[in-house]
Amino acid sequence: MRHGAKRSRRWAGRRGVRGACALLAALSLLVSACGLNVNAALPFDVESGSIRKVPQLEGVEITVGSKDFTENVLLAYIAQIALKAAGAEPIDFTNISGSNSARYALEKGQIDLMWEYTGTGWLSHLGNDQPIPSEEEQYEAVRKADLEQNGIVWLPYSEVNNTYGFATTEAFAEKHDLHTLSDLTDFLKENPQEAVFCVDTEFANRPDGMPGVQETYGFPTTTTKTFGLGAIYAAVANNTCNIGEVFITDGRIAGLNLRVMEDDKRFFPQYNAAITMRQDFYERYPQIAEVLVPVAEALTIDTMIELNKQVDVDGRDAARVARDWMAEQGFIKAD
């Protein structure tokens, strides 16, 4: 968030560090102070489509959590709708403030499952210093280590990979024939006056942010402006800066007609989304995997961009956006 933290995802938890809220929860269990507020049940009925009723899940209350950014909330609603179609009774705990607070809620049983990102698991929750470039290898490393060390099960990961990227306007990219970060580097070396970047404060200083990517590609930075992450998209669109830090599945990329440069040297860590659960809960209800894995397999980066756009740009309700997509895919029956 993604968003993720996206959005919560880097060494310190990309959308939120282990701050006072998580500490308060750990010390006092006053989880409501950390954004853990029950949002009750889905605001509409769900009728099964390709997802069939599962007798072992019939009537089972399953608390689904999410972090506090659009993509993770959307994914949580998608999971809730799938579980509802299978006969379970999902309880909505979306919008938990901070990545570490959400993880704490999962570990302590305040929520039963949530979508997490492989990069967050590997770098933040497991405390590793270096990402693994391969999506599959990083997922397997996270899956194995998190189960052994923390008793957390990771279901198979989705194509949705909400990692960092750099974006320009389509017009700027088209004018200068920019498609990859190597293209951008070559252009900026010849035109350093155009090297105007907008980034957030954390990205500007973190090893997997500006210092690391600049070292990898060797581009100049004539001017660096810092913004809150949400403001960067508009800053690029209105030409306050030529290049901006983005999360590559953010709907504002499509809504503002931006182009993300391909990370052709694969610098940025992989942040594939996957369902996570405590081992004891998974062993009690292994049928959850049968319900949710096909849904994860149907999700793509382009799909996530479009769904995020419908919420962040078009102003639609996240739960209803999730429901419409589930119906389009045939997982549930349309109204």
Image (spheres, helix red, strand yellow):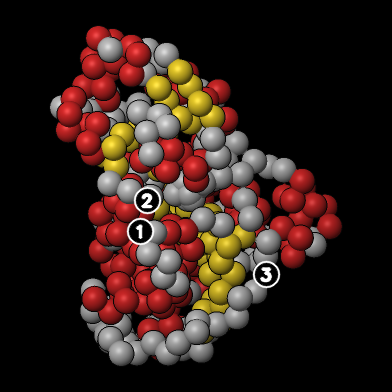
The first of marks 3 and 1 along the sequence is 3
Q: CA distance from mark 3 to mark 1?
A: 25 Å
Q: Is residue 91 left or right of residue 34?
A: left
Residue drawn at 48 percent across, 31 percent down: 199
**Which amino acid, by three-letter code, is at mark 1?**
Lys
Question: Residue 325 falls in which quadrant of the image?
Answer: bottom left
Location of mark 2 (residue):
252
SS of the residue under disc 2: helix
Q: Where is residue 103 drawn, in percent x and y?
A: 60, 53
Location of mark 3 (residue):
37
Front tag of 3 and 1: 1
Q: Is residue 214 left or right of residue 300?
A: right
Residue drawn at 55 percent across, 57 percent down: 67
Does the CB distance between marks 2 and 1 fall below 8 Å? yes
Instruction: Find residue 309 and name its label.
Output: 1
Q: Where is residue 191 drawn, in percent x and y?
A: 28, 12
**Which amino acid, by three-letter code, is at mark 2?**
Arg
Crowdedness near tag 2: few (<14), some (14–19) or many (≥20) residues, C-alpha within 10 Å: many
Q: State whether residue 192 is above or below residue 1.
A: above
Residue in front for this viewpoint, 11 or 172: 172
**Which amino acid, by three-letter code, is at mark 3?**
Asn
SS of the residue under disc 3: loop
Instruction: Find residue 20 and name its label.
Output: none
